[in-house]
Amino acid sequence: MISFPDVAPGERIAISATLYVTFRSCPQQALGRLRGEYPTESIASFKGSLAHRVFARHLVSGPIPERDVLQACREEIGAPEGHLNMKLAPLELNRPSRLAPVLAEVGDLYARFKRFPTDGFRAAEVNLEVDVGGGAILRGRVDAIFDDPSGSPVIIDWKTGARLEDSGPQLEFYALIWALERGELPSRAEAVSVQTGERTGIDPTPKRAEEVAREVAAMIETLRIALQTVSDVDRRAGPYCRWCPLLDGCTEGTTAVEILGGP
Ligand code: SF4
């Protein structure tokens, strides 16, 4: 139903929602990711990842009694698929006194999360992957799928900290991959703040999905040329520069951080 533009054959390249969102903010930072330059792991991202694992457990296996939440957190940290165990030492969370407040915050997030209705729940942590030809793959991991009253899928992305107003491009990317893999657009894609219960979202249309497909195809071409020719792409500075792994060598970014105020 949704067609993806032809992609010229080239080196294998995998495009995630994170890469697409990063490219829209700053193409050079996205290129850096493909060259192995990632933002350093933070306690906030660890907390978010652990909370998402606990949310998925709730949806799949049912509510976790309050007395078992800490144990559930520990089990999720040890689960191989989450890769959380290997992040403990670099973040110094292997010390009980450092880990305890993180687990307490995840417990607090879970207490809020379990108030959400689960009617229409279909699946949690759904991996999507589409081969769009020419060696290019689109990938996404959707937090949850619910069915709307007519039985059509609704994509849900839980937000434990990020601002909801930045979520549009990520949701559009998920809607595109869902449509390419499943042959139908989701009826809606939503970001939900676990802190406040606030929701924002998009009602995907074929026209917008085709536009996003063209943007992603153009992004693939731009990134591949830069990788092949060992050249740079556009830099677009913004508040996100302070977390960019390329900041030290980037004039645009350091200027932006000076103007906007750094950490
Ligand atoms: S520091 Fe800012 S402008 Fe420079 S590459 Fe990173 S995100 Fe882009």
Image: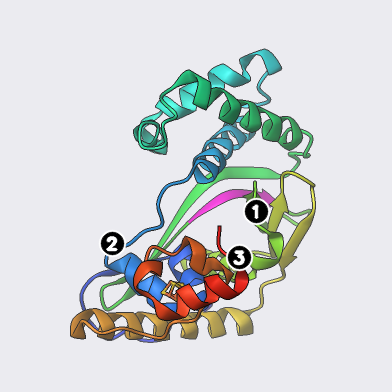
- Residue 33 within the segment the image draws in magenta: no
Whole-percent x, y for residue 173 in the image: 53, 69
**Who's the residue at 54% across and 72% down the image?**
258
Circle 1: residue type:
Ile
Q: Identify the residue shown where x is 62% and y is 21%.
A: 69
Give the CA separation, mark 3 to mark 2. Answer: 25 Å
Residue 53 visible in the displayed image: yes
Residue 143 covered by magenta stretch? yes
Relative horizontal placement of residue 186, taking residue 120 as reference (left or right): left
Q: Which residues are magenta?
A: 141-147
**Residue drawn at point x = 39 percent, y = 71 percent:** 30
The reply to whether callout 3 and callout 2 are in contact (CB within 8 Å) is no
What residue type is disc 2 on? Gly
> Residue at 26% of width from left, 86% of height from top?
225
The x and y percentages for residue 197 are 79, 47
Q: Which residue is mark 2?
A: 36
| Earlier residue among tags 3 and 2 | 2
The reply, left or right, for residue 153 in relation to residue 12 is right
Residue beneath label 3, please?
A: 171
Left or right, residue 19 beside residue 188: left
Camera-side residue: 224 or 210?
A: 224
Q: Earlier in the sequence, mark 1 or mark 3?
A: 1
Quadrant assignment, res 34: bottom left
Question: Which is in the foreground here, disc 3 or disc 2?
Answer: 2
Q: Which mark is residue 156?
A: 1
